[in-house]
């Protein structure tokens, strides 16, 4: 997992607790989870791009 072990993750958790405090930790976790969910949802979307010519462009070519 990216070379992180249990000790490294615990150190990161302690630093986050000190910086943000225990009160805001659930709020930050929820926002992080929502961001990850949105990223996964957008990456699983269609890979197709619809290209429709503008009516102005088609008039200029004629």
Image: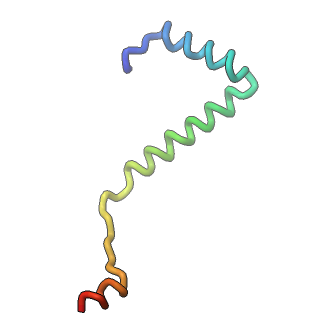
Front-most of residues 46 and 56: 56
The reply, left or right, for residue 45 in relation to residue 8 is left
Residue drawn at point x = 32 percent, y = 83 percent: 57
The image's colouring method is rainbow
Task: Give above or below for 35 relative to 44.
Answer: above
The reply, left or right, for residue 38 in relation to residue 21 is left
- State the image coordinates of residue 62 (x, y, percent, origin top left): 24, 92
Task: Give above or below for 25 relative to 53.
Answer: above
Residue furthest top as drawn:
7
- State the image coordinates of residue 44 (x, y, percent, origin top left): 37, 50
Residue furthest right as drawn:
23
Quadrant showing the N terminus: top left
Front-most of residues 62 and 17: 62
Residue furthest left as drawn:
62
Task: Give above or below for 29 relative to 22.
Answer: below
| Quarter of the figure with residue 12 | top right
Residue drawn at point x = 32 percent, y = 79 percent: 53
Residue drawn at point x = 61 percent, y = 38 percent: 31
| Quarter of the figure with residue 2 | top left
Front-most of residues 18 and 46: 18
Task: Give above or below for 49 relative to 22.
Answer: below
The reply, left or right, for residue 10 in relation to residue 20 is left
- State the image coordinates of residue 23 (x, y, percent, origin top left): 75, 25
Front-most of residues 44 and 3: 3
Residue drawn at point x = 50 percent, y = 7 percent: 7
Q: How many numbered badges does the structure rendering display?
A: 0
- State the image coordinates of residue 30 (x, y, percent, origin top left): 62, 36
């Amino acid at each position: 997992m990216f070379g992180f072990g249990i000790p490294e993750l615990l150190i990161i958790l302690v630093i986050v607790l000190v910086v943000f405090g225990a009160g805001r930790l659930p709020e930050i976790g929820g926002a992080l989870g929502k961001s990850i969910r949105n990223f996964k949802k957008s990456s699983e979307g269609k890979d197709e791009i619809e290209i429709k010519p503008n009516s102005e462009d088609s008039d200029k070519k004629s």
